[in-house]
Amino acid sequence: MSCYEIEALRLGLMNVLGTEDRSAREHAETELDGQLDGPIEALANAETLSEIERHLDAALVDLEEEIAATGSDDPEYDYMRGRLVAVRDAERAVHRLTDQGESVLGGLGEAHDVLHETFPADG
C-alpha cells in the first residue's frame, strides 16, 4: 500500500524548494511508479505553492471519491480512510507554508517602506 498523494506532494515540494536530495526523489518516484496521471502527476510536477494547493485539492477529491466507492468491508477501506486523514493534514501544512511565505513577503515590503521613510531619497 502506498500513499500516492503524499509522495506526489513530496516531489512537488522538492521542486518548489529546489531540493536536490536524489535518493528522496528516487524513493518517491519509485512509490509512484505507474500512478503518475491526473492530479497525482500534476502534483508531483508542481513548481509553485499555488499549483501544489490546486493539485492537492484535486487529488483529495479523487481520494474521497475512491473511498466513497469502496465498501467498508474491503480490507483496504481503513487504510484509505487513514490516507485521507494524512492528506488532509498535509493540505493544512501546505496552507500554513503558503501563509507563512506571504507573511514574510509582506514583512519585507513593510521593512522596505520603513527604510525609505527613515532615509528618504534626496531629490
Image: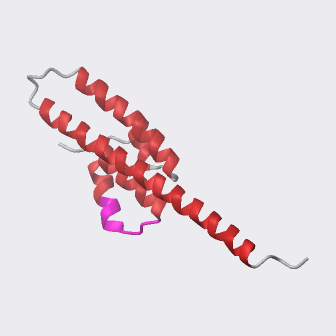
- The answer, for residue 4, to whether it is visible in the render is no
- The answer, for residue 89, to whether it is visible in the render is yes
Q: Does residue 112 lie above or below 97 as drawn?
A: below
- Residue at 42 percent across and 56 percent down: it is 13
- Residue at 45 percent across and 43 percent down: it is 53
- Residue 16, image x, y percentages: 48, 58
- 21 in the magenta segment: yes
Task: Give the magenta range.
Answer: 18-26
- Residue at 37 percent across and 49 percent down: it is 9
Identify the image's colour scheme: rainbow, by chain, secondary structure or one colour: secondary structure
- Residue at 41 percent across and 52 percent down: it is 96
Q: Quadrant of the C terminus?
A: bottom right
Q: Quadrant of residue 63?
A: top left
Left or right: where 52 falls relative to 26: right
Left or right: where 93 falls relative to 52: left
- 23 in the magenta segment: yes
- Residue 4, image x, y percentages: 29, 43
Left or right: where 97 falls relative to 23: right
